[in-house]
């Protein structure tokens, strides 16, 4: 049996909350949360059974308990973030999106290698208020295991709808999960979101200059909680699966006194764990890390460190995080029955073969009309704003291409490509062995990627994942031709 409508309505109701009382001003930097370490975030998970996931997601507006206080948000099934969808390669997926909002919305399956058309990952569909649409596709048999996610993708409304809470993680289980050390680790999915709310928990309009910079909310949540705690056993492993579901906020993450061992990037497993002291997670991106319980005990803060993501030019000062703050805590609890180390290898990793530079994408900005707000900044790829009716680039199924992004602006643009993952090309011209679907193109800088188009023809898109920039034009179409 797969999960029925009644089952997940039940889950939604269980998570529905009415919380009264004032919003504390201290959730950000105040006293640590009381209680023992908990498994943070959403308990609701919708898992495929017998190769099939058949679920309904209801998009609606309601009061939700966010970080311990009520917030008027938009949600899937009454939860922010939405329920975890859990599938395996080869599964048949049917997700019925039921729109109880007062405006149109739709779904995108960020990072999934499925068709960009029909009723699969087709962002050109729209679901009007009061209507429903079933997204139906099969996860390919050879799809890498990993963390992916769902969010609305209706051009012009994406940033606002995501900023109000519409996002849900999706996990594909597979070979990586079966590695004994990884399987032994305690796993948590950390959905990083930020919200701009007033004292009553109502969303605040960001205003024009925040749209140009990309809106950031001052309330940062991890799977709906403020500064959650995660338990690690001494000599044990903790697996933190990080997803940046924020509209514009970059996270530069570091765990006090513990290295992070990256085992997977956006598009799946690395060949071997990569040990780092910190990592940058741009909007849309995912990293899967192991933390080893190498200390004798205590609690350690997962910090968000300063990261300048550019400047808003004449409009204002530096963008991005300036003061470090804690987003979660790792707490020692108990001792592993038998010590578990970080695995030495994780699997095969292909490096895409070198090829000629096929396309250059120049990222720029220009003054123009911002709907409902007057004159403001528009964001362009190769001098043009997004037009869903125009084909910007034609590529051939089976080809490998190098793309170069050239950023002529004063802010970083984290570019994201649908349908096919890619690898970053280093200064030596070689592809770096990690599957990505996002790459940060630094302010006044460049980035080069290598991408292979496989399995699916159709019209995909690429865009800046500062979703305000995408809504303000920084998106283009890529037609994959058979
Ligand atoms: Cu998460 Cu087209 O984006
Ligand atoms: Cu995407
Ligand atoms: Cu951008």
Image (cartoon, grey):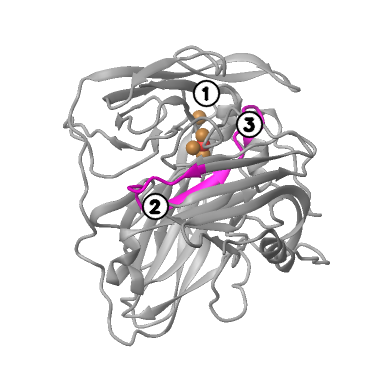
Asked whether mark 1 and ligand 3 are closer than 8 Å, the reply comes as yes
Question: CA separation, marks 3 and 2?
Answer: 27 Å
In primary-sequence order, the first of circles 3 and 2 is 2
Which residue in the protein does label 1 denote? 474
**Cα distance between the residues tagged 1 and 3:** 14 Å
Q: Which mark is residue 154?
A: 3
Q: Identify the residue position indicated by label 2 in the image.
A: 89
Residue at image coords 79%, 53%: 62
Q: CA distance from mark 1 to mark 2?
A: 32 Å
Residue for point 28% across, 85% down: 338
Quarter of the rendering containing residue 178: bottom left
Q: Is residue 304 visible?
A: no
Q: Tell me if the residue at label 3 has its CB under 8 Å from ligand 1.
A: no
Task: Confirm or deny contact between disc 1 and disc 3 (CB under 8 A).
Answer: no
Residue 407, placed above or below residue 30: above
State left or right for residue 175 relative to residue 440: left
The span picked out in magenta is 137-158
- Quarter of image, res 398: top left
- The spot of residue 358 in percent (x, y) is 28, 18
Residue nearest the viewer, comparing 351 with 71: 351
Residue 479 is situated, as x and y percent measured from the top left of the image, at 43, 20
As for residue 152 lying within the magenta part, the answer is yes
**In the image, which is nearer the foreground, mark 1 or mark 3?**
3
Residue 146, image x, y percentages: 39, 53
Give above or below for 287 relative to 399: below
Name which of mark 1 and mark 3 comes first in the sequence.
3
Callout 3: SS: loop
Front position in the image: 236 or 268: 268
């Amino acid at each position: 049996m797969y999960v029925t409508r009644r089952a997940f309505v039940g889950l939604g109701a269980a998570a529905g909350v009415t919380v009264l009382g004032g919003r504390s001003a201290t959730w950000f930097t105040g006293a640590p949360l009381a209680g023992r370490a908990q498994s943070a975030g959403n308990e609701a998970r919708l898992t495929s059974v017998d190769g099939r996931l058949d679920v309904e997601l209801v998009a609606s507006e309601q009061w939700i308990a966010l970080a311990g206080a009520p917030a008027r948000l938009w949600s899937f099934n009454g939860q922010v973030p939405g329920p975890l969808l859990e599938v395996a390669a080869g599964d048949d997926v049917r997700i019925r999106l039921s729109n109880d909002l007062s405006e149109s919305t739709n779904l995108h399956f960020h990072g999934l290698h499925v068709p960009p058309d029909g009723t699969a990952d087709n962002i050109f569909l729209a679901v009007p208020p009061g209507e429903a649409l079933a997204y139906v596709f099969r996860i390919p048999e050879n799809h890498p295991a990993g963390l992916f996610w769902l969010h609305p993708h209706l051009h012009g409304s994406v940033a606002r709808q995501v900023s109000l809470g519409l996002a849900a993680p999706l996990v594909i289980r597979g070979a990586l999960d079966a590695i004994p050390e990884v399987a032994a680790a305690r796993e948590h999915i950390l959905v990083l979101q930020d919200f701009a709310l007033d004292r009553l928990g109502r969303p605040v309009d960001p205003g024009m200059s925040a749209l140009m910079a990309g809106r950031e909310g001052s309330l940062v949540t991890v799977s709906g909680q403020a500064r959650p705690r995660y338990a690690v056993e001494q000599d044990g492993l903790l697996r933190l699966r990080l997803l940046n579901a924020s509209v514009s906020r970059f996270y530069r993450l570091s765990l006090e006194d513990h290295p992070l061992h990256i085992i997977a990037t956006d598009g799946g497993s690395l060949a071997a764990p990569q040990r780092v002291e910190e990592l940058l997670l741009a909007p849309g991106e995912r990293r899967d890390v192991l933390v080893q319980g190498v200390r004798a005990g205590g609690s350690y803060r997962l910090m968000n460190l300063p990261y300048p993501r550019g400047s808003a030019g004449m409009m204002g000062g530096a963008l991005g995080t300036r003061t470090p703050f804690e987003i979660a805590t790792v707490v020692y609890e108990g001792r592993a029955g038998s010590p578990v180390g970080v695995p030495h290898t994780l699997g095969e990793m292909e490096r895409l073969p070198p090829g000629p530079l096929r396309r250059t994408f120049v990222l720029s900005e220009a003054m123009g009309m911002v709907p409902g707000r007057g004159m403001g900044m528009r964001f362009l790829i190769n001098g043009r704003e997004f037009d869903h009716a125009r084909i910007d680039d034609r590529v051939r199924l089976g080809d490998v291409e190098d793309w170069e992004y050239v950023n002529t602006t004063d802010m970083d643009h984290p570019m994201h490509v649908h349908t096919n993952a890619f690898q970053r090309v280093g200064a030596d011209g070689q592809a770096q062995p990690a599957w990505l679907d996002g790459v940060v193109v630094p302010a006044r800088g460049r980035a080069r990627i290598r991408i292979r188009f496989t399995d699916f023809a159709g019209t995909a898109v690429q865009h800046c994942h500062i979703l305000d920039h995408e809504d303000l034009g920084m998106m283009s179409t890529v037609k994959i031709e058979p």
